[in-house]
Amino acid sequence: MTASAPSFLVKDGALSWPEISDMRQCIYPPEKLIHTPMHGIEWAHAQRRVLLYVEDEVRAVAGIHEREVLCDGQKTRVAGIGGVMTEPEFQGQGYGKQVMLHLMELLETEASCALGLLFCEDHNVAFYDKLGWKLFKGDMVVEQHGITGPFAFRNTMVLPINGPAKMDGHIDLCGLPW
């Protein structure tokens, strides 16, 4: 018996949380996070999520955060991508790539954003690079615990959507990272 073809749904971020909370708990258990640089970081909640289903079960997900940020002082609308996850037992089967490709197509057709922006750990840079994302080499500023300051916790990657992708300079997220 073969698995059915994946299907995609775009859902409200808060309403879709119950469907992905177990996956997140498995991938990022609090007892492990406390011993990582990720501990204590405040993250924005996704406005929408793309969920990939196989046989009526969520196998992968990616969050979307549309926001106006400042790129070298200029207001710029971006699509922030965060919370990209694949159920651990289904990793390596292409579901992460499929959910990202679907999300990127959605952004190209629906979003009124100049560029996509995501943060990732070192071991994920090659994955996103193969999908067309490029490393941002500038400065990133975010809000953390009510204070605005530099954010160098993870790699920042950009993707052109409706304009060129900014590769360096200064970006102020004007809020929490995603």
Image (cartoon, helix red, strand yellow):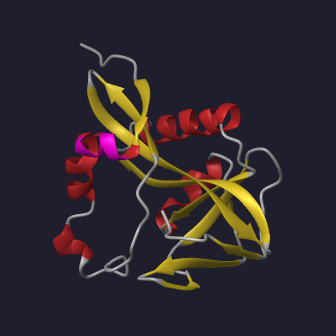
The percent position of residue 98, horizontal first and vertical second, equals 49, 34
The percent position of residue 128, horizontal first and vertical second, equals 58, 53
Image: 160 above or below 138: above
From this viewpoint, is residue 94 visible? yes
On screen, residue 129 versus residue 43, left or right, reads: right
Image: 93 above or below 30: above
The percent position of residue 25, horizontal first and vertical second, equals 21, 57
Image: 69 above or below 33: above
Residue appearing at x 63%, y 45% in the figure: 131
Q: Quadrant of the N terminus?
A: top left
Residue appearing at x 71%, y 48% in the figure: 113
> Main structural element of the magenta stretch: helix, strand or loop?
helix
Indicate whether residue 41 is drawn in magenta.
Answer: no
Q: Which residues are magenta?
A: 14-18
Residue appearing at x 27%, y 54% in the figure: 24
Residue situated in front as seen by the camera: 53 or 106: 106
The percent position of residue 135, horizontal first and vertical second, equals 68, 65
Indicate whether residue 16 is drawn in magenta.
Answer: yes
User: Furthest residue to the top?
Assistant: 1
Query: Which image quadrant is residue 61 in?
Result: top left
From this viewpoint, is residue 87 visible? no
User: Furthest residue to the left?
Assistant: 31
Residue situated in front as seen by the camera: 53 or 140: 140
